[in-house]
Structures are given as C-alpha cells and as structure tokens.
Image (cartoon, rainbow, N blue to C red):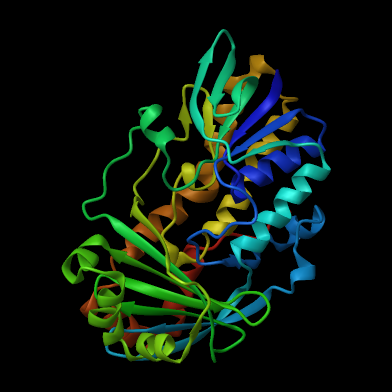
Amino acid sequence: MYDVAVLGGGLAGLTNAYLLAKAGYKVILYEKGSYPQHKVCGEYISNEVLPFLKKHDLYPQDFRPSQIKKFQLTTQVGKSLNLPLDTGAFGISRLLFDEFLYQKCKTVGVECLIQTKVYNCVFENSYFNISSSKGIHKSHYAIGAFGKKSNLDRVLNRTIKPEKSSYLGVKYHVRTDFALDTVALHNFHGGYCGVNKIEDDLYNICYLTKGNNLKQSGSIKDMENDILFKNPYIKELFVSSDFIFNKPLIINQINFNEKQLIEDFLIMCGDTAGLITPLCGNGMAMAIHSGKLLAEIIIEKKARPDLRREIQNLYSYYWTQLFSKRLMWGRNLQHLFGNHYLSNTILVLAKSFPYFVQKLISKTHGKSFS
C-alpha cells in the first residue's frame, strides 16, 4: 500500500512525487516511456518558477540553460515586432530536464516504474487499485499527470469537449544563427512557430498547426514548404539551420478545451488538468506550479484518507484561482494567431501601443512562487 500513486512522469508528476517523497510519504510513479526522452514541447520556462526550483535544489544549473529576456513576434507576411520580457525565462530541453527531475525523485525514495503502461485506476474500498504492465498496486491517493492525451482519458470516461479543429504539434532541435536571449513567435496560416535557445549550442523549433494544413499538403515537409515558408522568417530559419533529428517529433489531436480536475477521487495535475496554448509559453511553468500546489496541500493534510474531499476542494479552489484565467486568456489569444488579418492588426496596435502587448503577455504569466 502506497500513500500516493502518481500516474505520469512529466514535469507535474515528477514535481508531485519529489515533494511528497521528500516529506516522508511512500510514493510510486508510473511512466510509460523512459528517461531521458524527447517530448513535443516549447522548452521555454517562465522565471516565475525560479524561486521554487532553487529553494528545492531543482534548478538544472549544471546544464547551463539559456536565459531569455526578449520576445519577437512576426506576421505571416514577415512584419516584425520586438519587445522585452519583463519576467524573463530560461530554455532547457525536456530530454535533460525530465531526466534531471527523475534522478532527484530517486534520491528521495520515489519508486519509479518506467516503461510501464497504466491500464486502469479504480477507486474502491477506500483506496485506489492501479493496474499496469508491472502488476497491481494500491494507494490511498492517486494523481493523474499523464499529459496532453492518454488512453486513460478514454478508460476513465473523462468528459472533454472535442476541438472543432484538431491541432498538430511538431518539434525539431537545431543548430542555427539566432539570438541567444530571444524567444520568437512566427505566424503562418492556421498556426504559429516558436524558436528559442535551450542548452549548449542547441535551439528548439516547435510549431502548432491545424490538422487541416497537413491534410491539405499531404506531408510534413510539403506543409512546411507550402504554408509555413510563406512567412520569410520561418523560411530563413529552416533553410539556415542544421537539423539534429533525423525526423520531426510529432503529436496530434491536441485539445485545449476545459477538463475536469477530479475524476472519482483521482486528482488531475499539469496538462492533464488543463492544457495552456503553446503561444503563452507557460505550459512547463504551470505544470511545475500545479504539481507543487497539489503536493503541498496533501502534505498539509498529512495525506489522511478521511480528508480526501477536503483536499480536493482546496486544490480545486486554488487551481482555479491560479490557472483558470490564464487558460481562458490563452484560449482567447489562440484565435489571434494563425489568422492573417488579426495578427497584422495586433502587430500594428502593438507598435503604436507597446503597453497593450505587454498587458496581454502578463495575462498568461503568473507571479513568482516559492
């Protein structure tokens, strides 16, 4: 019998597991993949997380993450705007950061089951039965941190409103001649492409596009040539870069609609609880923050099984206070990007009223926390 079972070993799951085990709880973590591994991600983390990471010795200083201080926005026709980032950010690959957190979890006693597929998580007789490819385990609490999409969404019959148009995420690592301290967001028809430096001499290129673009073009390469390259900044980036991957990393059927936080006492965290649109650049920060929030509430209530309802109510309240407006702003801002007329209008307004864009950026960022 475990105190807590964490279903998923991404940023939210690893943060939960680390804090809970460090506080003395018996924790088991399931991860369908292994470490280190690449994930489709912008690999940009708002500095709002820095006090927390440094307080718990979770900042990956030895990997020398990039320091990001500026923001560039371009439209489909190549108009550009540059602004300072008030909060700032750092860039690091998921390959290194997830592995780093995984090793931290092992040092505090988390039982990590990697390359383990979870088949089901059922609450009965006042505890959870978790069935997986490594057998059946029991726990008093269970945390759903299985990411953007998972077979568990279907198994648990989660009510998630389908997207009107599904999205596709594509990621590359490259070596290129681009600013060391800038994150760029390049618009194209039906999507946007982000680029920023990560560790060493590597840069991350990650773009989100409507699935219709791929269907229309037939292949990733043709879609990039036909649609993305109409933005001259994207074309120059791709043409002048040295691509590290043999082929792109892809995830499809991404859903940004609202999700339930609780499913029959299973508490959701990170992207499983709600996925922020990538243009906001805060998915990683929010995953870490939500993991911290939930772990600290469970610790405060001493993980008592009779306080499950109270813990859920507290978590729901604070999660809503911290993240619901940011997710709403992200969903609304999503409509501005990938749209030729709206993105051009935003850029024109921003050049005349830079405070306007800074205000929009602030709506998707949170305050520093420790």
Quarter-wise, where is residue 2 in the image?
Answer: top right
> In the image as oriented, which residue stretches furthest toward the front?
246
Q: Nearer the viewer, residue 264 or 251?
A: 251
From where the camera sits, is residue 337 visible?
no
Image position of 29 with respect to 102: above or below: above
Quarter-wise, where is residue 43 in the image?
Answer: bottom right
Please give the name of the residue rendered at 41% of the width and 85% of the height, measured from the top-left corner. 238
Please give the name of the residue rendered at 71% of the width and 52% of the height, measured from the top-left corner. 101
Quarter-wise, where is residue 251 in the image?
Answer: bottom left
Q: How many marks?
A: 0
From where the camera sits, is residue 81 visible?
yes
Q: Nearer the viewer, residue 17 or 247?
A: 247
Name the side, left or right, on which 31 lies relative to 22.
left
Name the side, left or right, on which 37 lies relative to 100.
left
Name the side, left or right, on which 50 lies relative to 265.
right
**Percent x, y of residue 85:** 57, 78
Image position of 238 with respect to 127: above or below: below
Image position of 348 with respect to 246: above or below: below
**Percent x, y of residue 328:** 39, 54
The C terminus, quarter of image: bottom right
**Percent x, y of residue 31:** 59, 41
Please give the name of the residue rendered at 68% of the width and 46% of the height, measured from the top-left corner. 15
The N terminus, quarter of image: top right
**Percent x, y of residue 106:** 78, 43
> In the image as oriented, which residue stretches furthest toward the left?
216
Please give the name of the residue rendered at 38% of the width and 80% of the height, measured from the top-left corner. 186
Name the side, left or right, on which 38 lies relative to 20.
left
Q: Nearer the viewer, residue 287 or 5?
A: 5
Image position of 17 with respect to 164: above or below: above
